[in-house]
Image (cartoon, coloured by chain):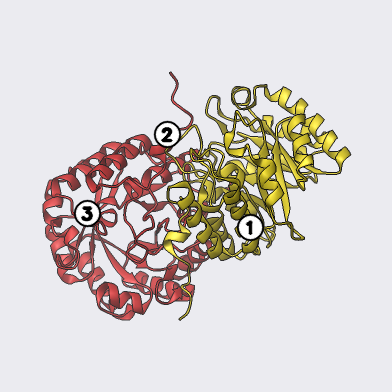
Chain colours: A red, B yellow
Amino acid sequence: MDERRELHTTIVEVGPRDGLQNEDRILPAEVKIELIERGVAAGITRIEAVSFVHPARVPQMADAEQVMAGVPRPGGVSYIGLVLNRRGLDRALAAAVDEVNAVVVATDTFCVRNQGVTTDAAMDAFEGIAGAAAEAGVRCGITIAAAFGCPFEGQTPPARVAELARRAHAAGAREIALADTIGVGVPGQVRDLTRRVRAAAPGLPLRFHFHNTRNTGYANALAAVAEGVTVLDASTGGFGGCPFAPAATGNIATEDLLYALHREGHTTGIDPQAVAATGAWLGDHLGKPAPALLGRAGPFPAPAG
Amino acid sequence: MDERRELHTTIVEVGPRDGLQNEDRILPAEVKIELIERGVAAGITRIEAVSFVHPARVPQMADAEQVMAGVPRPGGVSYIGLVLNRRGLDRALAAAVDEVNAVVVATDTFCVRNQGVTTDAAMDAFEGIAGAAAEAGVRCGITIAAAFGCPFEGQTPPARVAELARRAHAAGAREIALADTIGVGVPGQVRDLTRRVRAAAPGLPLRFHFHNTRNTGYANALAAVAEGVTVLDASTGGFGGCPFAPAATGNIATEDLLYALHREGHTTGIDPQAVAATGAWLGDHLGKPAPALLGRAGPFPAPAG
């Protein structure tokens, strides 16, 4: 066993946002709220609940304010709202999120397609968002998207990711998430990026966001925790497909990640079987089976009795 | 990067045997032969082609002799026949396999259900098989099944696996394969078992067989190669479900394993896209989509043009 690793891993549940925003079927706010309620009941403490982007671009998230008005607010649970610009930040602050998270895509072609600006301009926008969030007293993180590879430009140069991390750190980011948005990464990249980003943004908490598009997502997640990373994104049921690979699976599934982490000796405070049940329930609402496997395979060891 | 690791990994394609033997639909011999021909054309050099077990127990493998009579025999390709007893060995030798592989299940409850005898009795049988194979001049390996966990007994004690490896080595096994038959293992177990089995059976080549039943199979495979293991089983398309988890996926898929290995800097000599095409073709014959993801997601980086 690796002596560096932390034994407690925090899961950021991104199912309500990344899990749902690429689905054809738009779920009503009350179902989204129930998804969040179920997650909180299962022990999840950080949830990327909504995004504050233009409703014409992402109609799945048009009811962000309604969702945030309805979620439970027990102590110890933090809600993240995703924002791309100052207008989104203002909405997020008005909706009383606990944290905001901005996105900068590491490659220009993809960044222009995703948010209409180059990577450099998106980082300029992040600097404004981070400053305004700090003034408002709200924790602001950044996701560097396509940090492993881009559908248009191929493998993303790791030095480019490190430079973006350096700028984000200087701008006051409180956390950096590295996202394998299209699910092409492998563990060697996880180790390399972890070391480079830590050197470029010393002391800043690091978080990873993996997709299982080509079946490398769980290996990547375990490689990250072996490097001492303590925060991982995951999506209940494994929903959240990639628009560039419409037939493939999406985010790593919360329940399957919990299975692997717990069997490796980590604690998370979250009940995998409760999450697996929610994954199946969400599949019923979306009209398709959950990509997650734990719910189909069953617990191990089997419960006594 | 880990300095211990070898850069060439040999894939043992188990699709024609483990991939097909749990499927409801029984494929005709000519389709099995075409599956093997496609694998050889893609660069696969070791193939678990058939098993010589009682046709009443495994009707999917009843045509083993017919399959072996029809496969291509280019130089450098080795065919493995699975056997459980001396009768099976005699059939395998008559069918001119290049290697035989025997199975001993590490837990008694599962071993009795699988092959009608306790683990100890199965190991006694292996000793007879290994001796007879050596007399016939045919390489004989052993698979220690349920080496990670058992559906009836829970996690398999690693000391038990090491003791079986010691006995197999003493009996003349030329290779030991450790199988996560029900897909419950995690990388920490891979590392632990690798070290224990190497100590118990020094110098004997080690091979792993993973199922992706709970989404840990690829992480396990990469953990094995990081330990210097150079031989891995995989199944084209990821077919080969577990009878104890009928809704779950089965073997790790050859094409997805190739994607991960190649992106990590390993060579295999096998074309992933050709294997992915075969996985889709096999899905058509079995009447269900391949669990493998590479064929759905597409190559990365995208081909130029």
Task: Give, as a three-letter code, the residue at label 2.
Answer: Gly
Disc 1, SS: helix
Task: Give, as a three-letter code, the residue at label 1.
Answer: Glu
Q: Residue at x 68, y 51 (%)?
A: B70
Q: Residue at x 81, y 35 (%)?
A: B130
Answer above or below: position of A158 versus A52.
below
Image-based side of A39 in relation to B58, left or right: left
Chain to which the residue tagged by mark 2 belongs: A
The answer to whether the residues at label 2 and label 1 have Cβ atoms under 8 Å apart is no
Where, quadrant-wise, is the C terminus of chain A in this rendering?
A: top left
Q: What is the CA distance from the residue labelled 3 to the residue labelled 1?
A: 58 Å
Q: Position of residue A155 (x, y in %)?
A: 47, 72
Give the residue at mark 1: B37
Give the residue at mark 3: A98
Q: Position of residue B265 (x, y in %)?
A: 61, 66
Disc 2, SS: loop
- Quadrant of res A134: bottom left
Same chain, marks 3 and 1? no
Residues A174 and A240: in front is A240
